[in-house]
Image (cartoon, rainbow, N blue to C red):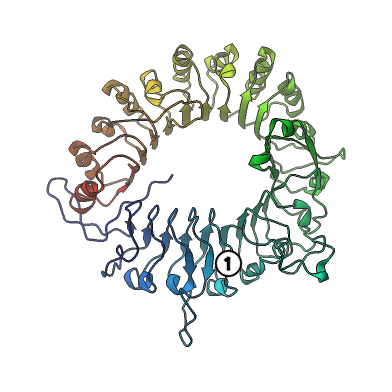
Amino acid sequence: MHAQPAYNENTNNISNTHNTKPFQSKILSRKGRGLEDDKWIGSAVMEHVEVLILDENQLTRLPAGELARCFPKLKVLSMKSCSIEKLSIEVLSHPTLEVLDLEGCKNLTRLSVWEEESKDGLLLGGVPSLQILNLLNTNISVMDSEWFGYTPNIMWLHMHCENICGGCGFGFLGELDILRCLKLTGIVTGSCINCKTENHSAGFSTAIKYSIYNMVCNMTSLVNLDLSGKEMNIDYFIFHAPLPYLEAIRMQGKLMRDMSLRDWPGIIKTIKHLSLGIIDHVEEQSPQKALSESTFYAEKILEASNLESLSFDCETVRRIKFSLGTRKVVFPYLRHLTIKNCDLRPLTFFNKENAPALDSLEIISPSFTEGYFYTIKKRLGNRLRSLRIGIEKMDAPQAIYDLFTFVRSHKNLEILHLSACDTITESQSFYKYFSDQPSLKELYVIGKMSVQRMKRFLYQLGRCSSLTTLLLDIEEPCLVLSYFYPIRSLRFLSLKGTFKNHSNFFVHQSTPQADFAKLSEMGNLQVLDVSYCGLTKFPSSILPGFKSLQYLYLNNNHLHDLSESMVSYLSSIKEEPLFIDISSNPTDVQKIEQTICNNTWLGISGYVLY
């Protein structure tokens, strides 16, 4: 979650109390205010507003023409998780709008040109400046064929397509001549009643003109392509023609008995980033199916000699095997490899000879067999700089020993993300590794551990003087803070309590002043994230110790107010901008607006999301 500048259209008054300066914000937020149709926009013209945020309201529609009238310089409109049912060009028309975000509007089913009915003789200006459109997690099923003709400059489209026929419903992509980034979720490659005709009695082995697999494979402007769906058959996509600018492609599709890439002669030798995977139906994920196997024949990957990153990413309980064949090839540019929730053998395909530049690895698996890390250590050598590991179960002491022997062997390791079960975090190998003071720069540790083990771990961590980024999600955040040792080299610290092993992290916590004072000893901190920590207060006395702080996340706690001393200090900051997120707290929104925004604004460099 990114902190947003706080905003109020009115020019803020100079306050003698807090020595603020007049300020006109370019951002207006009415997030989560219970706004109703026709009662929120008013009659005033807000000439300075460029960003309008209406997230999490019950708005079902926008009044026609009001966006352009009330916000003539609007560039960004966010209406996430609203109740919008239809989006029309008539309502949306705006000469300067560049970004439209409607993610999570589950009632949105239709894209239409007119709000009610066609108006002969009336010309619509459309949205000629729109470049980014986000329609993820919506339920669009009906689109006027001319809709995208009014948005000719879209370069970035994210859209959920579960209710759009994969055989005949994607003709609108032909209107997007300069589209660079396309992400479609919920894709169905099957047929609907309308496109099952005698002319296509052979089924969908022959591409239909407006099918998803025919349209996408001919979009020559694409740079990034991301397609996924539980009913999407990856076999249907055949890239015969080259896509000269395509650099990244990600496909997660339907689980089949046997799958393959078919022929991708147009793109396989030019793409730089490739991700393949399987999505299984949640209702089909049973213990019996966990024992079944499917094979993905991915030998075509061996022709992708320009790959820089490769990912096998699955969301299924079944065992998925990725077959890469036995040909001897070299991937001279491959830097990153991901193996997630699938058979681990593809990793053993790569070694020091055929992937000489590989220095980043991510492995996520429910369990690992004994000796596995010993095997890949022999193949990969000791050249990793980034390692991300997720393990749900590892009981064998030898397997845990092999894991940390593997980690320890990479002397140049700078980034370590470890999401692990308690048998790992409670093991001697875990503590032995950190007692050696590894020269890590970035460390994420997610996993439950006992209080005694946590004390020892935090003591060892306090001696790691090279760390600049640290995320700890190991126990109740306030308990972690009570045993935390300041690491003065840190620039980023997160104690966000959100991991799945917490029975109830969102509880009231009373943290002593001395524990908070530890944070102020880390003068190099630029980002401090204590969201979801159950805090009832945050002392302003520690803020002067943060000489470089740029982002402060206090969201999703139990803060009822900001103290007068905190506002006074924040309003005195004039040189560097400070972003503060206090959203999702039981605070009085009206009081915040009066205290912080209208009369005692934080100065020209202060920003707050509430």
Q: State the residue lying farthest toward the left.
A: 16
Residue 532: x, y in percent? Answer: 39, 34
Q: Is residue 152 visible in the rendered structure shown here? A: no
Residue 400: x, y in percent? Answer: 65, 17
Quadrant in which residue 382 is drawn: top right
Q: Nearer the viewer, residue 609 or 33?
A: 33
- Above or below, 126 relative to 515: below
**Residue that appears at 73% across and 67% down:** 195
Left or right of 172 in this view: 239: right
Q: Residues within 10 Å of mark 1 (few under 14, many from 20)?
A: some
Residue at numbered disc 1: 142
Secondary structure under tag 1 reads strand
Q: Nearer the viewer, residue 258 or 71?
A: 258
Residue 8: x, y in percent? Answer: 27, 57
Quadrant in which residue 157 is drawn: bottom right
Q: Is residue 131 visible in the rendered structure shown here? A: yes
Left or right of 241 in this view: 515: left
